[in-house]
Amino acid sequence: MTEEPLSPKRRLTWWQLVFPVLVLIVLFGVVLPKYIDYEDVWQEITALDGASLLLLTLLGIISSWTEAAIYTSLIPGLSYRAGWKAFLGGNTVAGFAPSPWDIVVRYAMYRGFGVDGSIAGASVIVGGGFQIMFAIMAPVLVLVYWVATGEATQTGRVLTALAVAAITGAVLIVALILRRERIAVRIGNMLQRAADWVFPKLKRPAPPDVVGSTVGFRRLLLRTLASRWWISALFLLTMHVIRYFGMLYLFREVGITARVVSASELLAVYAIGIMMSLMPIVPAGLGVVELTYVWLLAPDDPSLADQIAAATFTHRIFFWLLPIVIGIFPLVGWIRRGGGSMVKVAQSPDLTPT
């Protein structure tokens, strides 16, 4: 089976670059100013002392290393230093270009370190799947907690039930696929029929080999689940623990006390923010995540909103922007060494394990 799910199918079009910029202009120029005062936010950010900035720099670097390790731990024989370089290079591309160009660059850098194409593709797919799954599960767990403690409204209880049902259904489908290959083939056939019916109505071509993709996905999962998946999951959890405590530290540093926003309340909003970071239009949910914090924690308190914005923007600088800046160096070094042809990488049949 040969597939190219990680490869760009066509050249970048102008709207893929311009539309995200327009969304950012609306977010930062129209929506956010309704809740915050940029001048007050800047004063809060610049009030942080040198020790705080140093601590946040260290946490940002460690956080990026643990995120890279989510993928590196799935690649036998690849050093964590080399895996970090490959991740940083792709991460820098992600800050400027739409997906999947960041994945293509990271994959190519893995190959440059001598990693087999099938293993490199598996690490990208499985590691990315872990992160997406965690981002979806985290807010659902928050909803379940609110329902269990009786704090949820009727609407909240309905949404929680729907979310749990959807996740349970997805887990059951994956479990059935893993149980036997013939079940994977049957499910693939059903998905193929559904795709053949839906995609033409959306004026898009249907995937040509959903059955093959489903069987390949099953084999990929079985190999991963039988190996070092738990190490990858541990790095994923560690990364979010670091980032959460980084956010908690910033909340306290800008003057938001536990009586105003408790650690548990911040944890709940952090979980929701993780899901909002999946926003596909802007990189890592830029602006959307910050707006979520302000809207949930201080919809009617301008002073608190400014403090929250200062904390979340500073968190963005050290845990998102800093790794992008650091990643420029391994990316430029890789390009100077030849980098590899993007066209050749995009057409490589090794991107998906068979």
Image (tube, grey):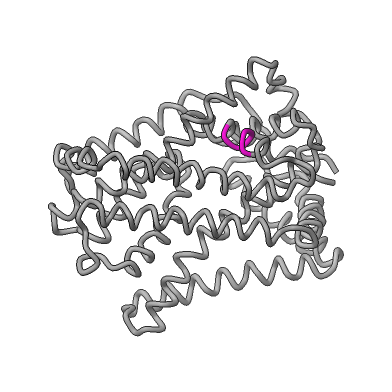
- Percent coordinates x, y for residue 126 in the rendering: 68, 52
- Between 192 and 118, the one nearer to me in the picture: 118
| Residue range corresponding to the magenta coloring | 84-88
Q: Is residue 217 above or below residue 31?
A: below
Q: Is residue 1 above or below residue 236?
A: above
Q: Is residue 70 magenta?
A: no
- Percent coordinates x, y for residue 71 in the rendering: 66, 47
Q: Assign the N terminus to one quadrant of the image.
A: top right
Q: Is residue 58 left or right of residue 232?
A: left
Q: Decide if residue 171 is in sight here.
A: yes
- Percent coordinates x, y for residue 307 in the rendering: 20, 51
Q: Is residue 2 left or right of residue 260?
A: right
Q: Quadrant of residue 44?
A: top left
Q: Which residue does the image show at 70% across and 30% down from the upper left?
A: 108
- Between 269 and 44, the one nearer to me in the picture: 44
Q: Main secondary structure of the magenta part?
A: helix
Q: Quadrant of residue 269?
A: bottom left
- Percent coordinates x, y for residue 303 in the rendering: 13, 52
